[in-house]
Image (cartoon, rainbow, N blue to C red):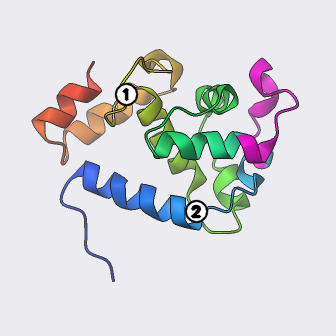
C-alpha cells in the first residue's frame, strides 16, 4: 500500500513519475480520443509524437505544437483511460499536462495555454483549493 501524498503537488509529482516510467508512448490514448478530429492541429498527427509531447509537459519542458492542440481539445471522455495498455490514467495525464502548459507547475517562460483553453479548469482549481493546496500553490494557479 502506498502512502498518501501530503500536498497536491506531492500527489502530482508521484503521478508524473509513475506515468513517465510506465508510458510506452504507444499512442493508443490519442487514437481513442474522440476529439482529435476537431482540431486542425491534429489532422494527420503521429500519435506517438503527440503523446511524447504531452510527456514533455509532465517533465516541465515545452511539448510540441500537436501536444498543445490535444491538451486544448480534451473533454474528459475517458476513452483514453480505457485504451491505455499500461493502465495509466491518460485523462489525468492530459489534465496534468494542461496544468504544466499553463505554467501552474512552475514551468518558466510564457505559458502555452491559458485557463480559457482548458475546459472546466477553474472548477477544478476551486475544488483543489478547498482541499490541500498551500497558499503558494493557490496563488500560482490563480495567475
* Front tag of 2 and 1: 1
Residue 117 shown left or right of residue 47 in the figure? left
| Residue named by callout 2 | 88
| Residue named by callout 1 | 103
Q: Which mark is residue 116?
A: none
Q: Of helix, strand and loop, which one carries label 1?
A: loop
Pinpoint residue 56: horizontal percent, then vertical percent: 54, 42
Image quadrant holding the C terminus, namely top left
The image quadrant that residue 24 belongs to is bottom right
Residue 98 shown left or right of residue 2 in the figure? right
Residue displayed at 62% across by 39% down: 53
Residue displayed at 19% across by 40% down: 130
Please tell me which residue lies in front, 130 or 61: 61
Is residue 44 shown in magenta?
yes
Numbered circles on residues, count: 2
Q: Start and end of the magenta stretch?
A: 32-49
Pinpoint residue 88: horizontal percent, then vertical percent: 58, 62
Q: Is residue 118 above or below residue 1?
A: above
Q: Earlier in the sequence, mark 2 or mark 1?
A: 2
Q: Could you tell me how far apart the alpha carbons at marks 2 and 1 are, in whole angstroms? A: 23 Å
Residue 47 shown left or right of residue 118 in the figure? right
Q: Of helix, strand and loop, which one carries label 2?
A: loop
Pinpoint residue 98: horizontal percent, then vertical percent: 49, 33
Image quadrant holding the N terminus, namely bottom left
Please tell me which residue lies in front, 19 or 138: 19
Q: Is residue 27 above or below residue 17?
A: above
Residue displayed at 27% across by 49% down: 9
Residue displayed at 78% across by 28% down: 42
Is residue 110 shown in magenta?
no
Residue farthest right in this picture? 44
Residue 77, can we see it?
no
Sort mark 1 into few (<14), some (14-19) or many (20+) by Cα contacts within 10 Å.
Answer: many
Amino acid at each position: 500500500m502506498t502512502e498518501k501524498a501530503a500536498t497536491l503537488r506531492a500527489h502530482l509529482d508521484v503521478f508524473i513519475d509513475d506515468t513517465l516510467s510506465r508510458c510506452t508512448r504507444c499512442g493508443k490514448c490519442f487514437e481513442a480520443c474522440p476529439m482529435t478530429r476537431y482540431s486542425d492541429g491534429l489532422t494527420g498527427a503521429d500519435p506517438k509524437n503527440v503523446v511524447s509531447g504531452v510527456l514533455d509537459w509532465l517533465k516541465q519542458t515545452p511539448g510540441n505544437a500537436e501536444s498543445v492542440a490535444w491538451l486544448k481539445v480534451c473533454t474528459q471522455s475517458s476513452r483514453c483511460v480505457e485504451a491505455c495498455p499500461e493502465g495509466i490514467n491518460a485523462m489525468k495525464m492530459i489534465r496534468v499536462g494542461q496544468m504544466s502548459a499553463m505554467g501552474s507547475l512552475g514551468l518558466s517562460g510564457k505559458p502555452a495555454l491559458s485557463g480559457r483553453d482548458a475546459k472546466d479548469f477553474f472548477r477544478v482549481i476551486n475544488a483543489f483549493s478547498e482541499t490541500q493546496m498551500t497558499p503558494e500553490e493557490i496563488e500560482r494557479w490563480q495567475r
